[in-house]
Image: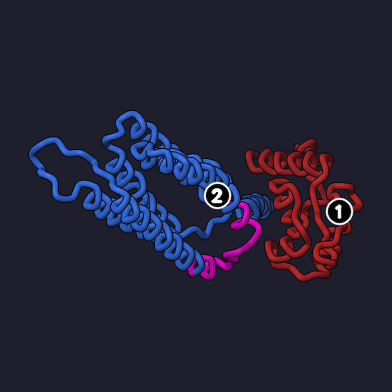
Amino acid sequence: MEKQKYLDDLQDIKTIMERSSRFISLSGMSGVIAGVLALLGAYSAYQAVYENQNYLSYRRASITSESLITLLAIASGVLILSLLAGILLTRNKARKTNQKLWDSQSQRLLINLFIPLAVGGILCLILLSKGFIGLIAPLTLVFYGLALINASKYTLSEIRSLGIIEVALGLIGCQFVGYGLILWALGFGILHIIYGIVMHVKYDS
Amino acid sequence: MKNILQDLNKAFENKVRLGIMSALVVNDSLNFNNLKELLGVTDGNLASHMKSLEKSEYVHVKKEFLNRKPNTQYSATTAGKEAFIKHIKAIEQLLKH
């Protein structure tokens, strides 16, 4: 009997430590949606860059100022829709688990996520303005991965390994610039879908 | 066996006090409302248990004003953290037997 009380105590301690230091209402389904949107985005970006080219000969990635605007529109569309889906689904899940969407845990999570992300975003804009377009797709992966690693201390621990894989894909992309878009689709699309499903199965029941 | 029982801390026998310390050892500081929501206790309940932890000098209290409203920040003292870790270790030992 005595033992049961202490087992309960340990369980309580663990639960409170988790709940007070980590934001655990992150929705797995929002990862899946973000992944699908990223794949659609990557496909339309591919169309915009390689349009009207012969598939049998060597292809050149041609980026005119016109297609650049299309690319930026696709990128911001994907970003905004993913964020919206993430916020809505996470809000629903937070309601279910009786956690607040906007509390000190989620604030800490977002701040730590956005510091590396903002640095990467600004760097990419600088590179864009100087014409180093090939490095942008892999660098977004690198900085997104670093942001996830940094934020993983404050949310579900799986996020950390997701971050590490994103960084690795980004570095490969920096070396093999021609595969930037494919790696981007892999990192933002496929990986989000896989991790989303895993986390949905594990936590969203 | 006797030694283990000595390491169990009376201050942490209570669920609320145990909860307060669990939250404070993994956070730099938390305010009264954070703790209240986290533990799901009433103002009076939390305040009285906090008083007793303050008395044992396990918790440090910092009163400040945020937008002219009083905001009390709580943090675990070094002594509090040590005592809490000792308590958990004692529980683990006890469960092994």
Residue picked out by circle 1 = B61
- Please identify which colour was used for chain A in the image: blue
Q: Which residues are magenta?
A: A92-109
Q: Is residue A144 left or right of residue A19?
A: left
Residue that protrudes farthest toward the right in the picture: B55
Q: Which residue is mark 2?
A: A114
Q: Residue at x 69, y 41 (%)?
A: B94
Q: What percent of the width, then of the height, locates residue B53? A: 85, 53
In this view, A186 is above or below A176: below
In the depicted view, which residue is nearer to us: A106 or B37? A106
Q: Colour of chain B?
A: red
Lateral position of residue B37 relative to residue A36, left or right? right
Chain for mark 2?
A
- Tell me where residue A119 appears, x and y as whole percent: 53, 43
Q: Amino acid at mark 2?
A: Phe
Q: CA distance from mark 1 to mark 2?
A: 31 Å
Q: Secondary structure at mark 1?
A: strand
In the image, residue A100 above or below residue A162: below
On the image, the x and y values in percent for residue A102 come to 60, 64
The answer to whether one can see residue A154 in this image is yes
